[in-house]
Amino acid sequence: MRIVLIGAGGQLGTALMDRLSGEIVAPSRHDLDLTDAQKIHSALAAARPDLIINAAAYNFVDRAEDEPERAFAVNALGVGVLARSCGGLDDPLVHVSSDYVFGLDDGRSGPYSEADAPAPTGAYALGKLAGEGFVRAYCPKHFVLRTCGLYGRAKSPGKGNFVETMLRLGRERGAVSVVDDQLCTPTSAADLAAAIVELVPTGQFGLYHATNAGSSTWYGFASEIFRRAGMKVSVSRISTAQFGARARRPAYSVLDCSKLARAIRRPMRSWQEALGEYVETRMIEDGR
């Protein structure tokens, strides 16, 4: 199988490179830019793939509020062109979306299923919802996976992830303040990649929610990071309003992943177990 993997240098792309089998074509941004329709068409025509995986995105949530056109060009319009190309080639497309497509229901207390109506609140979230809509409309053979709180190793430099940020701030400051009124599910890029690799051969196309199991606030996530790392760091609770982010975040965005579990015949493991493995590996790599 020949697979085109877009965004191979990012966190999810790096994890996928470790797990995919077959011939992997990993175009650079110069060769396949989601804001350049001609490059999308040319790259896919030249590669003649059996499967396309889009692990690339504009994911600067706050910056998107100041440059919404750029965010929409990558997360929506470019994805639309990609979906049309894949549909025309009759090739399956895996596209990764976000829990941020939900966000207006501040009183929510139960996990969202794929059947629940989205309600995005900012430029980033609007673009992600539009992108997944284009994929579902233009490419019949699609897997759209919404995930949440993604973290993992990345071969190319980027925006980093919450785990690495907490470990760095914990070492530098010994104390952090973290939001405690947003409930979500931290998700390992390695675990998401494994689920994608298992899902594709099923041929069960459609929309899926894909996160590790359980839920936590960002405060709870940070506390568990330091516990797993054996670091004594003072973690203080703050509110979303106190943090003062540019873009609005969902107060509750836990996803029901039972559809995915049925498709791959297993549930995703708990976010705590996945985090423990990641932190342990990072400690070994750093010689600590």
Image (spheres, grey):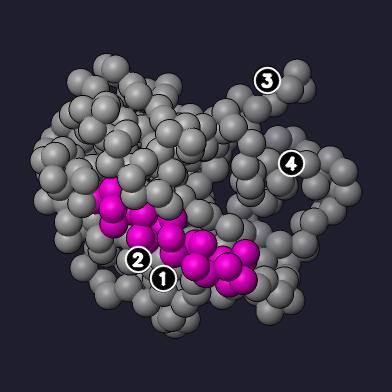
| Range of magenta residues | 62-83
- Choose mark 2 or mark 3, whichever is in front: 2
Q: Which residue is mark 3?
A: 284
Q: Which residue is mark 2?
A: 129
Amino acid, disc 1: Leu
Q: Nearer the viewer, residue 216 or 160?
A: 160
Res 197 visible: no
Q: Residue at x 51, y 62 (%)?
A: 70
Question: What crowding class fits label 3: few (fewer than 14 Cα within 10 Å), some (14-19), or many (20 or more)?
Answer: few
Of badges 1 and 3, nearer the viewer stands 1
The number of discs equals: 4
Residue at 62% over, 64% down: 63
Check whether the beta carbons of the residues at disc 1 and disc 2 lie within 8 A of each other. Answer: yes
First in residue order: circle 2 vs circle 3 = 2
* Type of secondary structure dominating the magenta stretch: helix
Residue 240: image tag: none
Circles 1 and 3: CB distance less than 8 Å? no
Q: Which residue is mark 1?
A: 126
User: What residue do we see at 27% from left, 17% from top?
Assistant: 22
Say whether marks 3 and 4 touch (CB < 8 Å): no
- Eye-nearest disc, 1 or 4: 1
The residue wearing badge 4 is: 167
Estimate the x, y position of residue 104 in percent, counting from the top left. Answer: 43, 81
Kind of element beneath mark 1: helix
Residue 81 magenta-highlighted:
yes
